Image (cartoon, grey):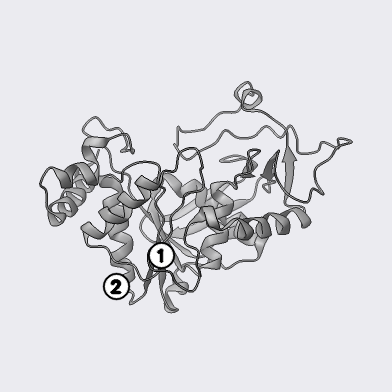
Amino acid sequence: MIQAAGSENLREHYRGRLAPSPTGLLHLGHARTFWTAAQRAIENHGTLILRNEDLDPQRSRPEFARAMMEDLRWLGIRWSEGPDCGGPFAPYEQSARREHYLAAWRSLREAGFIYPCTCSRKDLAHSASAPNDGDMDDEPIYPGTCRERKDKEDASNAADPAGINWRFRVPDGEAVEFEDGNLGPQRYIAGKDFGDFLVWRRDDVPAYQLAVVADDAAMQITEVVRGADLLKSTARQLLLVRALGCGAPDYFHCELMRDANGVRLAKRHDALSIRHLREGGMSAAAVRELAATQARTAP
């Protein structure tokens, strides 16, 4: 059983982070989560870091990066390290941190924690496995097709990860447990609740799970505040933390915010974007209160 350390990390100097992706405008759910992250840093007399998670070259846009920083500042959130102000762990844009991810990939490959996978999206779509609960963060449970393959052109000793998918081999049947600072005890079973997950994509982009773990470790993050849709990702990331020999941060997952129809807010909800509400004449205080009210009344 792997178990996260709990809240003793908070005895050290607190380092929290905001980690938005510039793939659209931030909405009310982001406002609530990022405001929570900022307040927890203040309450713990700590440091708040802004990290631009612009890994996806097809969806990330500079105009969204500018908008997210403007909107966060307008809400009243201030950070001490980030793309706009620098800091001891720069760069703070994931697109500029490739060497950190390559180092993590090499470490995992050399220790035998990952393996190359040639399965296509079509292959996985035709497999019997599918996401268990419709979690937007979830990926289908991998059927294990490439786990034990020994092809003549085995890429296990490749010098770089480009051109093929790389998956983390989860310890089937092992429980991953952690105490969430907001939602309490959490428990997931590797191989049942999630399967072998991607750490590097064939288009030569490091996967979210690997990049986040590498960056949180490098930037000495002590607590991760984010949405509850990423609870299962936390279980995956704790396996990566152990494999890489990093210290695990604490976790605080905020309840998801939903619209009037019970649909989880996403960046396509432009009417509930911070920018739309701001341009409509709402004050920052009113937006923060609306976000808090929506959270209390969400179905």
Task: Report the Cα–Cα distance between label 1 and label 2.
Answer: 20 Å
- Choose top left, top right, bottom left or bottom right for residue 72: bottom left
List x then y, in percent, for residue 75.
22, 57
Q: Is residue 139 left or right of residue 279?
A: right
Q: Secondary structure at mark 2?
A: helix
Q: Residue at x 58, y 46 (%)?
A: 207
Query: Do we see residue 277 in this rendering?
Result: yes
| Residue situated in front as seen by the camera: 232 or 123 | 123
**Rendered view: 124 above or below 244:** above
Q: Is residue 262 left or right of residue 4?
A: left
Q: Amino acid at mark 1?
A: Gly
Q: Quadrant of the C terminus?
A: top left
Q: Quadrant of the N terminus?
A: bottom right
Q: Amino acid at mark 2?
A: Glu
Q: How many marks?
A: 2
Q: Which mark is residue 82?
A: 1
List x then y, in percent, for residue 18.
38, 59
Q: Which mark is residue 43?
A: 2
Q: Crowding at label 1, few (<14), some or many (≥20) Cα neighbours within 10 Å?
A: many
Q: Secondary structure at mark 1?
A: loop
Q: Residue at x 38, y 68 (%)?
A: 85
